[in-house]
Amino acid sequence: FSDIGFKYFLESPISTSQRREDDRVTYINKGQFYGITLEYINDADKPLKNGTVKSIVMLVFREEKTQDEEVKAWQFWHSRQHSVKQRILDADTKNSSGIVGPIEEVAHNAIAFYWNPLEGQAKVNIAVQCLSTDFSNQKGV
């Protein structure tokens, strides 16, 4: 939930096995599409300035890395793929809804799209095309 009335949720179950002091964890399968639903909760104190908004979905590392370290990790992953066209994040445009115009690839790990929150929620289906072990020469990490 954001401080300006937007609510986002990933349609995937949350892991039941976690330590009390840890954040909630959701495990997703490589290549499987999951819906992300975006909603706007109208707030008279913070009205929208425009009917159409831009949302960006970005895949990032949980551990904080510098931008340079993160780019190197993505480049390492990409260098090990069979095709230069392989994406880290794929979007299923046919099964997405409430989106205005095309879904754009804005970075090696991000997509962007426009939607009109005043007309209702939007849903975009995404698939992550990597595993955590893809970022290490050592397997089982």
Image (cartoon, helix red, strand yellow):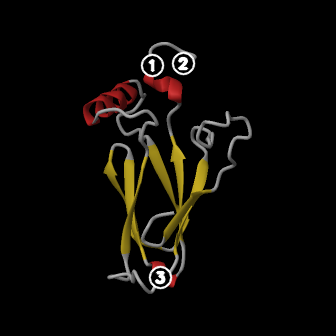
Q: Nearer the viewer, mark 1 or mark 3?
A: 3
SS at circle 2: loop
Q: Where the C terminus falls, by quadrant?
A: top right
What is the C-alpha distance between the residues marked 3 and 2? 45 Å
The answer to whether residue 19 is above or below residue 92 is: above
Q: Which residue is mark 3?
A: 43
Q: Are marks 1 and 3 in contact (CB under 8 Å)?
A: no
Q: Earlier in the sequence, mark 3 or mark 2?
A: 3
Q: Residue furthest front?
A: 21
- Judge left or right: residue 55 versus residue 31: left
User: For residue 141, which numbered disc appears in the image?
Assistant: 2
The reply to whether callout 2 and callout 1 are in contact (CB within 8 Å) is yes
Percent x, y of residue 73: 35, 28
Q: Amino acid at mark 2?
A: Val
Residue 129 percent location from the top left of the image? 50, 38
Dot 1: what SS? loop
Quadrant assignment, res 97: bottom right
Write the residue at 39% across / 80% down. 46
Question: Residue type at mark 3?
Answer: Asp
Instruction: Residue under label 1, please give it.
Output: 136
